[in-house]
């Protein structure tokens, strides 16, 4: 009898450890896969009057987006190596995935954030942290592969402020004069903000298969397209790189990237051109996941305001349609967003 109880206890613990997390706020959502614990990010869209969360990275197999860590010359892919054990937890306004080995711990945090003057959460703050457990210094390099897919069906994989249609692989270092790198979609889009810290040291725009198969660094000098026949057809991705840092004994390294989401590619690119960077942004000020949104001035933010209202209406419609299952947390979130919109419009109850 005791053996049976122990068995079921272990099963319960394993199931609990692998249970998917799901955090939603404003226009965005982050969830984890219940089998791999890999993170997936979404944006709320409204298609033909129906609300839907559109995946911003490919979610058919969430493992196609991953983190690789170079520790003193040895390379590990998080989630695919036995040297690291994976756990997850919910944190304030996001999720945290932890990869722990004997010598170090790699932590990935994805937090929902209001960026570029938005009054509601419309983007993500992504942090990578490496903690050195040992009594000696470590040399650390980080790589994050993001399996973008939104523009693949149209053949318009990426857009830059300087080039609205990127058709070949390319390399962007920290000196590149680019504000953002956009993955434009039909109903939703996402952009890596690349104009100021915090940001990666360099970014590679490449075919996903070539980028995924590269041990760590990837040579994009040949300027090839996004097809590797017969393995990966019309398939693109972003590779984010952080150059070598020395992490002292018992110390921690933390790096960060910022991502903002939007609607259809054409509208989103137009909005970015008009609204990013925000005119009232203080030089050198870093965005954080918990900062208060800065009220934008003028009519240039009208599209963002309308979008926020539409998103709230969609959430209210969804709550009404599922009134028996809507949680108190979701209800409080809707009321909080409604109050924020009322304040924005100068309405008092």
Image (cartoon, helix red, strand yellow):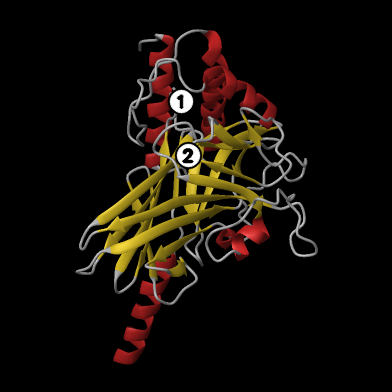
How packed mark 2 is, by other alpha carbons closer than 10 Å (few <14, some 14-19, many 20 or more), is some
**What residue did someone put label 1 on?**
116
Task: Choose between 245 and 211: the one closer to the eye.
Answer: 245
Q: Which residue is drawn at 38% across and 81% down?
A: 8
Task: Choose between 307 and 124: the one closer to the eye.
Answer: 124
Q: Is residue 273 left or right of residue 327?
A: right
Task: Choose between 89 and 245: the one closer to the eye.
Answer: 245
Label 1 or label 2, whichever lies nearer to me, is 2
**Is residue 212 among what the camera can see?**
yes
Please state, as top left, top right, bottom left or bottom right, where the C terminus lies in the image. top left
Q: In this view, does 325 lie to the left or right of 91?
A: right
The reply to whether dot 1 and dot 2 touch (C-beta < 8 Å) is: no
Q: Residue at x 53, y 29 (%)?
A: 179
Measured from the top left, where is residue 322 in percent x and y?
Answer: 53, 41
N-terminal of the two: label 1 or label 2? 1
Q: Is residue 256 left or right of residue 187?
A: left
* Residue 174: mark in rendering: 2
Measured from the top left, where is residue 338 in percent x and y?
Answer: 43, 23
Q: Quarter of the image holding residue 132? A: bottom left
Above or below for 205 versus 15: above
Q: Which residue is drawn at 71% across and 53% down?
A: 235
How packed mark 1 is, by other alpha carbons closer than 10 Å (few <14, some 14-19, many 20 or more), is many
Q: Residue at x 33, y 26 (%)?
A: 292
Q: Is residue 218 left or right of residue 330?
A: right
Measured from the top left, where is residue 175 in percent x and y?
Answer: 49, 36
**Is residue 324 among what the camera can see?**
no
Measured from the top left, where is residue 218 in percent x and y?
Answer: 59, 57
Q: Which residue lies furthest to the right in this view?
A: 230
Above or below for 228 versus 53: below
Please state, as top left, top right, bottom left or bottom right, where the N terminus lies in the image. bottom left
Q: Which secondary structure, mark 2?
A: loop
Q: Which secondary structure, mark 1?
A: loop
């Amino acid at each position: 009898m005791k053996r049976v109880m122990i068995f079921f206890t272990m099963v319960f613990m394993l199931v609990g450890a692998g249970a998917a997390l799901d955090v939603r706020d404003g226009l965005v959502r982050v969830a984890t896969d219940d089998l791999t614990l890999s993170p997936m990010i979404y944006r709320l869209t409204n298609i033909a009057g129906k609300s839907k969360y559109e995946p911003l990275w490919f979610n058919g197999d969430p493992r196609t987006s991953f983190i690789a860590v170079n520790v003193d010359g040895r390379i590990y892919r998080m989630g695919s190596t036995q040297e690291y054990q994976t756990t997850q937890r919910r944190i304030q306004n996001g999720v945290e995935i932890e990869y722990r080995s004997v010598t170090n711990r790699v932590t990935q945090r994805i937090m929902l954030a209001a960026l570029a003057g938005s009054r509601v959460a419309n983007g993500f703050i992504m942090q990578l942290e490496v903690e050195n457990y040992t009594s000696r210094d470590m040399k650390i390099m980080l790589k994050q592969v993001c399996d973008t897919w939104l523009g693949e069906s149209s053949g318009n994989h990426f857009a830059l402020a300087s080039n609205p249609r990127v058709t070949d692989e390319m390399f962007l270092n920290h000196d590149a004069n680019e504000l953002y790198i956009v993955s434009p979609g039909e109903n939703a889009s996402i952009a890596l903000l690349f104009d100021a810290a915090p940001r990666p040291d360099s970014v590679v725009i490449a075919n996903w298969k070539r980028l995924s198969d590269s041990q760590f660094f990837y040579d994009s000098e040949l300027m090839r397209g996004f097809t590797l026949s017969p393995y990966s057809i019309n398939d693109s991705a972003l590779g984010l790189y952080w150059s070598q840092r020395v992490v002292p004994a018992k110390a921690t390294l933390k790096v960060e990237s910022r991502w903002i989401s939007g609607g259809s590619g054409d509208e989103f690119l137009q909005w970015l051109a008009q609204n990013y960077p925000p005119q009232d942004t203080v030089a050198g000020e870093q965005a954080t996941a918990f900062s208060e949104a800065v009220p934008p001035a003028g009519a240039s933010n009208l599209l963002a305001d309308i979008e926020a209202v539409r998103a709230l209406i969609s959430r209210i419609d969804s709550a009404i349609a599922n009134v028996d299952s809507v949680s108190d947390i979701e209800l409080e979130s809707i009321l909080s967003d409604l109050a924020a919109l009322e304040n924005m419009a100068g309405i008092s109850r």
